[in-house]
Amino acid sequence: MHSLDFEYGDKTIQDFMNLYEKGQLNLEPGFQRDSVWTVSDRKKLIESLFQNYPIPSIFLYRRNQNGEIRYDVIDGKQRLETVLIFQGVGHLGPRFGIKIKLEPDGDIEEWDWAKIKRRNQAHLLKGYKFQTVETTGDLSDIIDLFVRINSTGKKLTGAEKRHARFFHSEFLKQAGNLAEKKRGYFLEHGILSAGQISRMKHVELVCELMASVQAKGLINKKAALDGIIGGYTLNARMLNKVVQETIRVFNLVEKMYPRIKTTRFANTVDFYSLFVLTWKMDDEGYILIDAKRNQLAQDLLILFSNGVDTVRQKVKIAEAAEPDQRLFVDYLLTVQGNTDSLPQRQNREAILKKVLGKLFERKDDQRGFTPEQRRLIWHSDETKRCVECGKSLNWSDFTIDHIIPYARGGKSTLLNAALMCRTCNSKLGMKKTSKR
């Protein structure tokens, strides 16, 4: 079942001109194809409009952008582009004329827009009404509608269908690529079904996760996906950072919760919240790579999931929850109604943070050693040798290493410090040898 809503109406060509000039009409949303009409095609359309022939409906995706209504063209780009080119609006293509009889007592003549205006015939075009279908709905369903509509007439080629499904902006290309890489993970853990993936729900989910990483936290799903449909972009450096962070958090979630498919967090709503919370905890310096703590987190997530499911079953049979099940009740309330609203997501995240947050340590706020600590550590070591390779060190070439790695919770204290040469320190990283 799709989640599209339709509203039928009409707009004059003058209406469309006004929208375009105000920046409220987007002819090239992310899924749209390039212009394929020839000048001959465009001439035939303008001639048909002047003769008041009926023309197929224009399909528009209607959305809110900063308090203004904005229309992204789902179908009808070539038609709207043609009337704008003919009238010289914007710089969409070379202008052209038509050969037609416009005046009752006149002959067939060559007409361009300047001549039409001089002869007071502009109203014949500007007043023409296109039937419109204004649409709202999910990103994946909008794309599916676009592909279905364009299966007739000048049909989409295979490449254009792929373009429509994965878009032309780099943000959406990267989201599409990552979604395809995670297809197996989504299927294996029941996060998405094969049918949902065929309708590009995996791309939609990854777009949402990447947008959340970019926003550094929870987002309103509709607003974010509206921006993506409209051609959301990032510069190359920032986009690469977002992609790498999203991949890193995917890896963390997979390692921390290997049995996620046995919990309610395989649902996309719950998975989104768990994913963003994992990103936020990692960003705040929580240590999420300890195997024992991760096992506890997985077990606790299962217990919490079971608790919420138990309460849900009680609700279905009109049985009251127990007093000690209040947290499960609160969480259940966040996955009912408008689950994608920002307030609901914020409540869901707060509850999950309460459940999981206390399991994990945070990294020391002090990353390195102070000059005072360096002097004390140097003078307290009588050997003045690298703890790894035994090389003799001098004041100008020594480094200080965390015995327990900083990334694993090691503190920048005198008791957790050892002298090391620069070569060993750069090679060692987090791989501590048996000498420790």
Image (tube, rainbow, N blue to C red):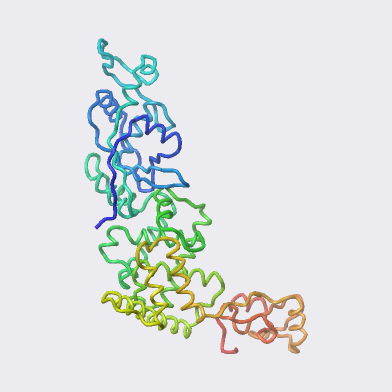
- Please tell me whether residue 310 is drawn above or below residue 350 in the rendered image: below
**Going 40% across and 82% down the picture, which residue do you hit?**
323
Q: Going by the image, does 16 lie left or right of 104?
A: right
**Going 33% across and 75% down the picture, which residue do you hit?**
261
* Closest to the observer, 121 or 310: 310
Q: Which image quadrant: the N terminus?
A: bottom left
Q: Which image quadrant: the C terminus?
A: bottom right
* Closest to the observer, 413 or 121: 121
**Residue 223, how many percent across, how many down?**
43, 53
- Please tell me whether residue 179 is drawn above or below residue 150 in the rendered image: below
**Residue 77, how many percent across, how many down?**
33, 38
- In which quarter of the view is residue 191 placed? bottom left
- In which quarter of the view is residue 61 placed? top left
Residue at the extreme top: 105
Q: Going by the image, does 419 lie left or right of 141?
A: right
- Please tell me whether residue 234 is drawn above or below residue 79 in the rendered image: below
Labels in figure, total:
0
Q: Going by the image, does 265 lie left or right of 420?
A: left
**Residue 198, how many percent across, how many down?**
27, 59
- In which quarter of the view is residue 118 placed? top left
